[in-house]
Image: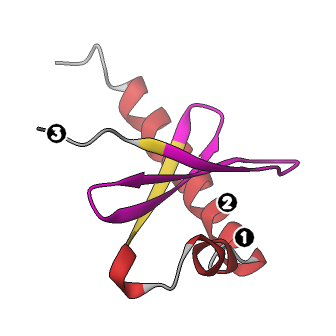
Amino acid sequence: MSKKVRLVKDIPHERYKIQIFNYNGKYIVKIELGQFEQSFKVAEIDVSGLGEVENMITNELLSNSLKRFVEMRSDWSNGFNLKNTK
């Protein structure tokens, strides 16, 4: 029997959609911006609970995520421009 992904927390933010899920013994932090998303996984046994996972979502993490989102958009745009060249 497979486990279902369960949303355990929506974290309000002015720029991102941030959600924490629980699945198969892991917490999954998903950060979305527009059409792009990043996810981070941590085993339940490596943290003391949901609060500790929330504490891992720092301003530094979100700032670095923004840099990655900009890179992702650039990479995707470059690939999109090549879609009809083959």
The residue that appears at 54% across and 39% down in the rendered structure is: 36
Q: CA distance from mark 2 to mark 1?
A: 5 Å
Give the quadrant of residue 84: top left
Q: Which residue is mark 3?
A: 2
Q: Is the residue marked by circle 2 packed among few (<14), some (14-19), or many (20+) residues within 10 Å?
A: some
Name which residue lies at 38% across and 74% down. 44
User: What is the quadrant of the C terminus in the image?
Assistant: top left
- For the stretch drawn in magenta, the main secondary structure is strand
Mark 3 vs mark 1: in front = 3
Residue name at image x 88 percent, y 48 percent: 14
> At label 1, which amino acid type do we have?
Ser
Residue at label 2?
66
- Specify the amino acid type for callout 2: Leu
Whether label 3 touches label 1, CB < 8 Å: no
Q: Nearer the viewer, residue 64 or 59?
A: 59
- The percent position of residue 9, horizontal first and vertical second, equals 65, 51
Q: Secondary structure under badge 1? A: helix
Residue 79 in picture, x, y percent from top left: 36, 33
Residue extending farthest to the front is: 1
Nearest the eye: 33 or 70 = 33
Q: Is residue 32 magenta?
A: yes
The amino acid at mark 3 is: Ser
Please say whether residue 74 is visible from this viewpoint. Answer: no
Which labelled disc corresponds to residue 18? none
Res. 9 visible in picture: yes
Q: CA distance from mark 3 to mark 1?
A: 35 Å
40 and 2: which is toward the camera: 2
- Classify 14 as above or below 29: above
Q: Which residue was labeled with disc 1?
A: 63
Q: Earlier in the sequence, mark 3 or mark 1?
A: 3
Over which residues does the magenta segment extend? 7-36
